[in-house]
């Protein structure tokens, strides 16, 4: 039996947030830039979740992450 990975917008946001914090991608890049860091076989699921949550691949990663609270401000 194959275990399917359950994708959620929260999971995608967490992954994107980690990539931004590592400096791998910037908040200004389109969401599509994340496809380089998500396995190709999983990208179709990611696209579906984004679409269901009204995100376009051309939207900025910052739009996906939304407002962030910083502890050190």
Image (cartoon, helix red, strand yellow):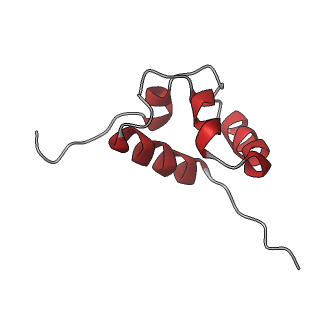
Residue drawn 65% across and 30% down? 54
- Residue 44 sits above or below residue 29 on the image: below
Return the residue found at the far bottom: 1
Return the residue found at the far left: 73
Q: Is residue 9 left or right of residue 49?
A: left
- 52 or 60, which lies in front? 60
Q: Position of residue 63 (x, y in %)?
A: 47, 27
Quarter holding the C terminus is top left
Q: Is residue 72 left or right of residue 63?
A: left
Residue drawn 36% across and 37% down? 23
- Residue 58 sits above or below residue 10 on the image: above
Residue drawn 49% across and 29% down? 61
Q: How many marks?
A: 0
Residue drawn 50% across and 33% down? 64
- Residue 49 sits above or below residue 60 on the image: below
- Residue 2 sits above or below residue 44 on the image: below
Q: Position of residue 59 (x, y in %)?
A: 57, 21
Quarter holding the N terminus is bottom right
């Amino acid at each position: 039996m194959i275990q399917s990975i359950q994708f959620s917008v929260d999971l995608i946001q967490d992954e994107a947030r980690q990539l931004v914090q590592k400096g791998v991608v910037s908040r200004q890049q389109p969401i599509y830039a994340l496809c380089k860091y998500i396995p190709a076989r999983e990208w179709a699921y990611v696209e579906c979740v984004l679409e269901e949550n009204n995100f376009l691949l051309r939207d900025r990663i910052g739009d996906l992450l939304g407002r962030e609270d910083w502890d050190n401000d």
